[in-house]
Amino acid sequence: MIERAPDSDNRPRAPFHVAAIMDGNGRYATARGRTRSDGHRAGATAARRIVEAAPDMGVDILTLFALSSENWNRPPAEVRFLLQLLRRFLRLECRRCVERGVRLSVIGSRRRLPARLVAMVDHVESATSAGRRMQLRVAIDYSSRDAILEAAARWAASGEPAPTREGFARALGATGALASPAPEVDLLIRTGGEKRLSDFLLWESAYAELYFTDTMWPEFAPAELERAIADYRRRERRFGLVPRSDPA
Ligand code: IPE
Ligand code: IPE
Ligand code: MG
């Protein structure tokens, strides 16, 4: 678990959680007369650059949406390619994450994943488990509604009385290798021009600040992440309260 130094008022600072829906690989490639696979490859390179840059921008947790449960219904050749690409991504990221103190974990269902990919996930999660600089979570075969349903079923089976928000967040986080409460998203980025959540981190994003950009994911550079974070820092998060500038 990432722990932050206390704030000036001595309250522990919540980790800064950025989540990204990495959309637009296919359109990036077809606009250039290239294949969708080329687009996904370029998307993986962009993800690598973002992972490398994020810790220096104060990001404590970075969650990347790599493959949704719905994406499984794409043409089988594309799904196969994506699964191979993900395995390769994890293999290459493993050493880099260990060197940089990044803890990598995978969220989502493992039931349908090829055995070789599951083995790679297990390997990377245990090899990077000492990382404290940033937590990188890669969402593979992920559906937020399914994750919520599974957490609800686990809670019901435990025989505990109705959960509190905190209790439910713990049940929701219990699926990941880290088994820590599902972290609240501070900043949710979606590239590719669409303005929807596509079943990503629905519970965790209840009070997330949203950042939508027309940039296709392969072109989403660290400089734009920096702009998104700067934009986030200028916003006032009110959590239902009145503006801070209002007279008491
Ligand atoms: C995001 O890019 C990657 C995945 C969903 C796996 P897309 O493949 O959705 O790209 P577009 O939206 O078709 O351009
Ligand atoms: C969301 O993108 C999933 C990922 C980026 C992995 P999609 O391209 O699947 O989303 P929709 O279909 O446009 O909603
Ligand atoms: Mg898309």
Image (cartoon, rainbow, N blue to C red):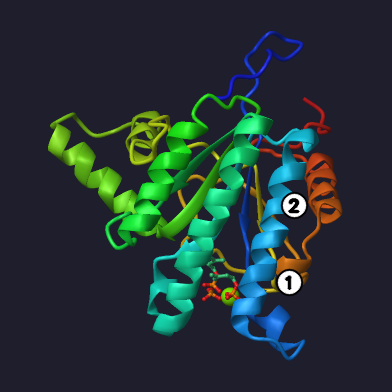
- Residue marked by disc 1: 216
Q: Is residue 215 above or below residue 89?
A: below
Examine the rendered structure and indicate whether residue 57 appears above or below residue 50.
above
What's the residue at 48%, 54% (across, down)? 139
Give how far across and how far down residue 184 sits, in percent: 54, 38
Looking at the rendered image, the quarter that the C terminus falls into is top right
Structural crowding at the residue carrying mark 1, measured as other residues with C-alpha within 10 Å and reported as few (<14), some (14–19) or many (≥20):
many
Q: Residue at x 42, y 40 (%)?
A: 123
Report the side of 81 relative to 13 (left or right).
Answer: left
Residue 145 image position (x, y, % from top left) = 37, 58
Q: Residue furthest bottom?
A: 33
Q: Position of residue 164 (x, y in %)?
A: 34, 31
Q: What amino acid type should be assigned to the residue bearing mark 2?
A: Arg
| Separation (CA) of disc 2 from disc 1 | 15 Å
**Callout 1: CB less than 8 Å from ligand 1:** yes
| Residue 239 in sight here | no
Q: Is residue 209 left or right of residue 233?
A: left
Residue 49 marker: 2
11 vs 183, nearest the viewer: 183
Q: Residue at x 29, y 44 (%)?
A: 151
Rendered residue at 67%/56% (across/down): 47
Residue 18 image position (x, y, % from top left):
65, 44
The answer to whether residue 157 shows anywhere in this view is yes
Give left or right: position of 235 versus 48: right
Secondary structure beneath label 2:
helix
Report if the beta carbon of the residue with label 2 is closer than 8 angstroms to ligand 1.
Answer: no
Which of the pair 113/144 is nearer the observer? 113
